[in-house]
């Protein structure tokens, strides 16, 4: 009886041990979470056109330009549409003054040509009269009757005098012709300079009407106004060549971010990305890694040994809330393979 109880106890003990080893063990599960790399940056457009104030060709090119017309910020524009208009009244008034100057310069050339023609004819008449006097003196100096030595000497002196005067007039005529040509050339150059002055202002007048070079979205740029930076508005003064607007293609938006050089080895072109914007917390946009910088760069705000690699994330699709210069983040799914090439 005792041996039977011992046998039953051994059986229960073995069963309990087997149950404890196998009966309560849960099936294995894969608890590994997907790896995600989070970057921060700012939105921009890959395809855009800068709109700057025109560089004036006229001599008065240093003056400020006043915007009297400006499309609203965020407006959709078409290629060739007027996006800005600069006040041109002062230039138009100056063009009218320069036009009068050009007409006067052309009139001065014509007037001087007529005056020179009269002066030239008078010089020719004087030369002909001098030749006539020389011929008469030569005829008078020929032997004709009985003349005293003094009379012959006087006649010879008259011949020499008229010949010298005739030769001098011939030389003066050549010099006067060159002088007339130089004077006309000076007047023509003056008229040409005034015409070029007029053409430069007419070119500036055409540039005062600014048209969109492409279809896209009008994005205003900040300028220094009233002691602080502010978005450009109608009525503001801008300088020649100053950037005041961009026309961006909303279908080419991207997030410009940076990744630490240590983590950059995990980033590949074509990886799937989820982009979120700080201004719209509930908005999630699908994206793709578009490009990775070749060199790591530093910043004066960080230690010299900290380097970051620029990364461009191309956003797929469009959204009315997606505009340039918005701060946001990008979560790169590192465990997913690149399934598609980045957009062009």
Image (spheres, rainbow, N blue to C red):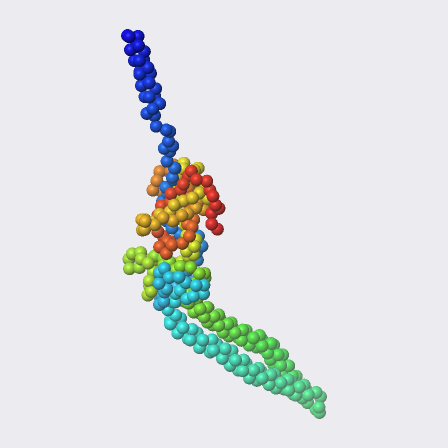
Q: Nearer the viewer, residue 167 or 329?
A: 329
Asked whether, in this view, residue 150 is left or right of residue 315, the answer is right
Q: Quick check: can you spot residue 139?
A: yes
Asked whether, in this view, residue 128 is left or right of residue 205, the answer is right
Q: Whole-percent x and y of residue 164?
A: 62, 80
Residue at left offset 39%, top offset 67% = 85
Residue farthest to the top, as pictured = 2
Residue at left offset 66%, top offset 88% = 136
Q: Quick check: can you spot residue 119?
A: no
Q: Give the image quarter of residue 243.
A: bottom left
Residue farthest to the front, as pictured = 1
Say if 107 sits above or below 53 in the image. below
Residue at left offset 47%, top offset 43% = 339
Say if 207 sits above or below 319 in the image. below
Say if 43 sits above or below 218 in the image. above
Q: Whole-percent x and y of residue 202?
A: 45, 70
Residue at left offset 40%, top offset 54% = 318
């Amino acid at each position: 009886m005792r041996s039977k109880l011992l046998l039953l106890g051994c059986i229960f003990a073995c069963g309990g041990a087997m149950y404890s080893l196998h009966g309560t063990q849960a099936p294995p599960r894969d608890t590994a979470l997907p790896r995600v790399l989070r970057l921060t940056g700012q939105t921009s457009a890959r395809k855009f056109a800068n709109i700057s104030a025109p560089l004036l060709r006229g001599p008065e090119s240093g003056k400020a330009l006043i915007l009297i017309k400006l499309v609203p910020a965020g407006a959709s524009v078409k290629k060739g549409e007027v996006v800005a208009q600069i006040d041109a009244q002062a230039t138009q008034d100056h063009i009218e003054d320069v036009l009068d100057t050009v007409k006067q310069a052309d009139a001065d050339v014509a007037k001087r040509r007529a005056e020179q023609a009269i002066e030239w004819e008078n010089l020719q008449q004087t030369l002909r009269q001098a030749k006539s006097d020389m011929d008469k003196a030569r005829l008078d100096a020929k032997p004709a009757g009985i003349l005293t030595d003094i009379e012959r000497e006087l006649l010879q002196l008259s011949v020499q005098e008229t010949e010298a005067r005739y030769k001098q007039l011939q030389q003066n005529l050549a010099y006067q012709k060159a002088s007339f040509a130089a004077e006309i050339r000076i007047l023509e150059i003056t008229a040409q300079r005034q015409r070029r002055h007029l053409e430069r202002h007419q070119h500036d007048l055409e540039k005062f009407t600014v048209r969109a070079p492409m279809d896209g979205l009008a994005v205003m740029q900040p300028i220094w106004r009233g002691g602080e930076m502010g978005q450009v508005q109608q009525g503001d003064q801008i300088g020649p060549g100053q950037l005041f607007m961009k026309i961006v293609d909303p279908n080419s938006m991207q997030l410009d971010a940076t990744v630490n050089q240590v983590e950059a080895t995990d980033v590949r072109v074509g990886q799937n990305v989820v982009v979120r914007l700080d201004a719209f917390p509930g908005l999630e946009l699908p994206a793709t890694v578009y490009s990775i910088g070749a060199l790591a760069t530093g910043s004066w705000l960080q230690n010299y040994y900290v380097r970051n690699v620029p990364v461009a994330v191309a956003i797929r699709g469009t959204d009315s809330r997606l505009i340039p210069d918005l701060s946001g983040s990008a979560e790169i799914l590192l465990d997913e393979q690149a399934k598609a090439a980045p957009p062009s």
